[in-house]
Amino acid sequence: MDAQLFPGLGASSSSMTELFRHLCSLVAEIDQPAWVASIRREIEGGQVKDEQAEQRLMHGVNLLCLRLWQKRNINFEHVCGHSLGFYAALVAAEVIDEESSFALVDNVMVLAKKITIPRPVLKTVTSVQPLAAESLAQSIGAEIICMNAPNQIVLHGMPANFCRLEAILPSLGVCKVNTLATTVPFHSSLLHPASQAIRDFFHASGIRFHSPKKTVWSHVDAKPLESCEEIIDTVATQITKPVRWHSTILEMKTQGVQRFAEATPNRILSRILRWIDPDICLIPSIQTS
């Protein structure tokens, strides 16, 4: 069995607008929906530096790549998304349509921003050796919001927490610490108050969730989501739970997934999968040239 993986905002880069335009040209014969024109206007208006617009752009790239895979008649039995990529996975499994997925992306961001969290700092810690993640986070008073691989985690905390991190870096064999440019600590327990607001939005918006046509995996619970109820619960609560990407990929392999394909050509997730299992079988990324 094969699985298609959709990256989150961590896969975004300065070349994303160019990739979006290129992907639009590759699927030009497909009727392009209103969201394509909306993102184009945001690009032309220079709004992509806004965090919400950047999320919309990354989500748009995921959906255009999905259309490109489908156009080439390449389909997958399993789908999974990393953080923001979860919404594209739901589209791939025909749980929601594209327009509904953008409504979710936009409104989850708006509702999360209403939670006041002073000066949040998010940092990716990548080591040349496996990290004792729980011990590290506890020692500096930070919260793990993503466990990507044995050697990479994402931490959320206040500036003082990361001053303590700098002091112990030499003992960890850490090769890189990157600060993430975000104002919202997605996957932090501090966003718990937003979960009910997201559920209220579901009821008010009338977004329809359908039974998945493919096996959809939860990136926060490392298990398949078999019903609409489970999917709705994951959409509402995922922003409060850490991403368990490492555990999810290993569990997918345990349940029979043999090959993995990153939906976009960015190869961010492909590199992480190699860290999880150097012998993992990767399907080449979709060719956009």
Image: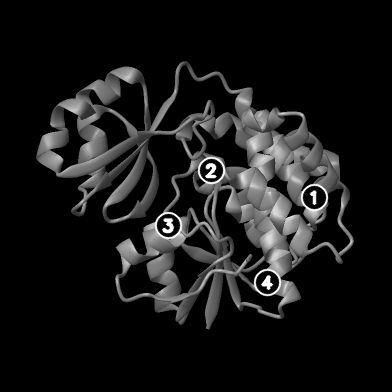
Question: Are there few (<14), some (14-19), or many (20+) residues within 10 Å of tag 4?
Answer: some
First in sequence: mark 1 vs mark 4: 4
In the shown orientation, is residue 137 left or right of residue 168? right
- If the image is split into quadrants, where does the C terminus sit? bottom right
Numbered tag placed on residue 234 in the rendering? none
Marks 1/4: CA–CA distance = 21 Å
Q: Amino acid at mark 1?
A: Ser
Q: Residue at x 60, y 54 (%)?
A: 86
Look at mark 3 in the image and give the residue it sits on: 245
Q: Secondary structure at mark 2?
A: loop
Residue at the far left in the pictured view? 171
Look at mark 1 in the image and give the residue it sits on: 100
Instruction: Indicate which label's residue lies in the foreground, 2 or 4.
Output: 2
Q: Residue at x 76, y 38 (%)?
A: 201
Numbered tag placed on residue 69 in the rendering? 4
> Which residue is at the front of the view, 214 or 223?
214
Look at mark 2 in the image and give the residue it sits on: 13
Q: Residue at x 27, y 28 (%)?
A: 141
Q: Secondary structure at mark 3?
A: helix
Q: Residue at x 61, y 46 (%)?
A: 16
First in sequence: mark 3 vs mark 1: 1
Q: Amino acid at mark 3?
A: Trp
Question: Are there few (<14), some (14-19), or many (20+) residues within 10 Å of tag 3?
Answer: many
Q: Which corner quadrant of the image does residue 158 belong to?
A: top left
Marks 2/4: CA–CA distance = 22 Å
